[in-house]
Image (cartoon, grey):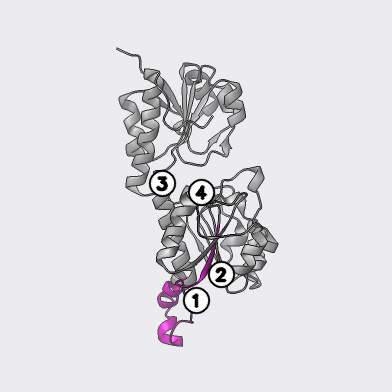
Amino acid sequence: MQKKPHVLIYAPWYKPAMDRLDEIAITHHLYKARNKKEFLAEHGPKCSVIGTMHYCPDSLMEAVPNLELILNFGVGYDGVDIPAATRRGVKVVNTPEVLNDCVADMALSLILAGRRKLVDADRYIRFGNWEKNGNFEYVHNVHSSKVGILGLGRIGLEIATRCAAFKMDIGYHQRTKKPDVKFKYYENLLDMAKECEILVAIIPGGESTKGLINESIIEAIGPTGLLVNVARGTVVDNEALARCLKDGRIGGAALDVFPEEPKVPKSLLEIETNLILTPHMASATHLTRMKMGMILYDNLKALTNRTPFTTLIN
């Protein structure tokens, strides 16, 4: 009988999926420890696997000297030091594909809620304003509007498919044009921002995309436009966004991600209208999170059985 590998769980994920690891591994939950330094010193050397969500610095790998595999719960791995892992001979796996539909659903939900001002309308009723002041303000349509998608990867294409069902005029920007895509391609992000009424960000995080949606881009979306971010919080200059929302240079925003989660910039929290904030929940459905967890389960089994990993990054 094969020995079960020891797994250091740095950050927890969907519990029913995480619990499945106990069938094939011995898990050590660092996030529960009162003294993390002592916990790492005791359990780090016996572990060959780290389980985490989007984050694993070289310093954590250093504390697990027999490390062979990092299980990253999520598609994005900008917080995982891939060069350090590769240098150490450590494999890194993630959970692509299975969350495409859920993230695309969330993007469309934010588009609908942002353009139709559903959150503001809900507050309007709850504060008694419908009865006191009459009907809610007029809002902007979703159908037939122009949407620009920043990043037409797997999830971006799913967002585009949903936007097409709403009869939207679709464009996209990324580094290279997709030859097999019929949507309008913009070589320049600013040009797309000027022409679209809705800009949806769905690109990877990291230094190369940090602050890509800057004040000029936000301002270009315009006083009736909407910015939707289901990518990474670092992609948007959030302080610039707050300024543009406050002085009306952009019509609204709907954000599911933030630079230092779970912290949300105070400048955004101060804004009470035309801004929707959700707690990084785009893939947070029971079905999707279980599928994501089972991808990591299968990769962990592959380590034990010395068979190929299914979603290898490096």
Instruction: Look at mark 2 in the image and give the residue it sits on.
Output: 197
Residue at 38% across / 19% down in the picture?
304
Residue 66 in the image: above or below residue 260 = above
Q: Earlier in the sequence, mark 4 or mark 3?
A: 3
Crowding at dot 1, Cα within 10 Å, few <14 / some 14-19 / many 20+, comes out as: some
Residue at 47% across / 68% down in the picture?
168
Q: Is residue 270 left or right of residue 9?
A: right
Residue at 61% across / 58% down in the picture?
266
Q: Is residue 129 left or right of residue 246?
A: left
Instruction: Look at mark 3 in the image and give the residue it sits on.
Output: 99
Name the image quarter holding residue 18. top left
Numbered label attached to residue 183: none
Residue kind at label 4, given as amino acid type: Gly
How many numbered dots are placed on residues in this image? 4
State which region is magenta: 120-149
- Mark 2 vs mark 1: give the one in front: 2
Q: Earlier in the sequence, mark 2 or mark 3?
A: 3
Residue kind at label 3, given as amino acid type: Leu
C-alpha gap between disc 1 and disc 3: 29 Å
Residue kind at label 2, given as amino acid type: Glu
Tag 1, which secondary structure?
loop
Crowding at dot 3, Cα within 10 Å, few <14 / some 14-19 / many 20+, comes out as: many
Residue 205 in the image: above or below residue 186 = above
Instruction: Look at mark 1 in the image and give the residue it sits on.
Output: 140
